[in-house]
Image: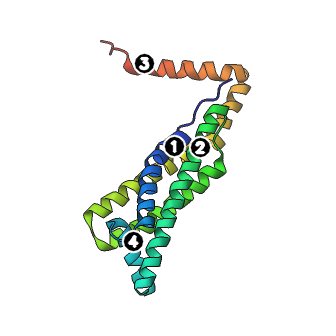
């Protein structure tokens, strides 16, 4: 029996497809740059904000910029690892590893906050829009995954218990499908005169 693909892991795979090339290229460009990526406005904003908080000198600014580029590269590599896990799960007809998914989600949210808060402090509209878009991409995946897990843990067992009590596991799916079909038919039926 083929398992149905859940929306949360698939949604997060699409988010990862965006972040792997975007953040990977930005991180490599910053790591190989002689200016430690300070020519890139979002990267420079985060590095300067952290420098101001900890009162680093110019050497501290360069090290901070390199560390931030390395963090971005690690997050891009984590997204790539999740994509590999997702494809393996599709081929093996199983669920993606939850620990990998949770770790990548945690890294992504942390990195986006790390880069997004300094953009808010600068009050630069373009930077705020960029980081808000990236934050919404990741948070949408977090919300979908959280709702799916809640449904899986609380609502699905109740439905199965109710179906087993009313006619067995085999009666569960056809009755549910018939219920949805009847609701759809009633909703879209022509109004009676």
The answer to whether residue 31 is visible is yes
Under tag 1, what secondary structure? helix
State whether residue 19 is above or below residue 37: above
Circle 3 residue: 186
Q: Quadrant of the N terminus?
A: top right
Circle 1 residue: 13
The answer to whether mark 3 and mark 1 are in CB contact below 8 A is no
Q: Nearer the viewer, mark 4 or mark 1?
A: 4
Estimate the spatial distance between the alpha carbons at disc 4 and disc 1, rounded to whole Å. Answer: 33 Å
Q: Mark 4 or mark 2: which comes first in sequence?
A: 4
The answer to whether mark 4 and mark 1 are in CB contact below 8 A is no
Q: Residues within 10 Å of mark 2 (few under 14, many from 20)?
A: some
Circle 4 residue: 34
Q: Mark 4 or mark 1: which comes first in sequence?
A: 1
Estimate the spatial distance between the alpha carbons at disc 4 and disc 2, rounded to whole Å. Answer: 32 Å
Q: Mark 3 or mark 4: which comes first in sequence?
A: 4
Under tag 3, what secondary structure? helix
Task: Name the residue located 64 percent from the left edge and 37 percent from the top edge.
Answer: 89
Q: Nearer the viewer, mark 1 or mark 2?
A: 2
- Give the numbered dot on residue 84: 2
- Give the numbered dot on residue 42: none
For the residue pair 149 and 46, the one nearer the viewer reads as 46
Task: Name the residue located 47 percent from the left edge and 69 percent from the top edge.
Answer: 68
For residue 36, side relative to residue 158 (left or right): left
For residue 167, side relative to residue 18 (left or right): right
Estimate the spatial distance between the alpha carbons at disc 3 and disc 1, rounded to whole Å. Answer: 37 Å
For residue 11, side relative to residue 82 (left or right): left
For the residue pair 25 and 173, the one nearer the viewer reads as 25
């Amino acid at each position: 029996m083929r398992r149905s693909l859940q929306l949360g892991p698939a949604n997060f795979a699409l988010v990862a497809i965006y972040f792997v090339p975007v953040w990977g290229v930005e991180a490599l460009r910053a790591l190989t740059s002689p200016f430690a990526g300070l020519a890139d406005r979002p990267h420079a904003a985060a590095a300067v904000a952290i420098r101001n908080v900890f009162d680093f000198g110019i050497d501290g600014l360069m090290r901070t910029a390199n560390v931030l580029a390395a963090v971005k590269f690690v997050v891009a590599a984590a997204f790539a690892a999740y994509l590999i896990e997702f494809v393996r799960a599709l081929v093996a007809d199983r669920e993606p590893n939850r620990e990998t998914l949770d770790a990548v989600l945690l890294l992504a949210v942390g990195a986006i906050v790390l880069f997004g808060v300094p953009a808010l402090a600068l009050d630069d509209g373009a930077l705020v829009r960029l980081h808000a878009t990236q934050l919404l991409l990741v948070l949408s995946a977090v919300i979908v995954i959280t709702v799916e897990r809640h449904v899986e843990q609380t609502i699905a067992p109740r439905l199965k218990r109710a179906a087993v009590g009313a006619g067995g596991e085999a009666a569960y799916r056809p009755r549910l499908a018939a219920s949805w079909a009847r609701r759809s038919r009633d909703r879209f039926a022509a109004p009676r005169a």
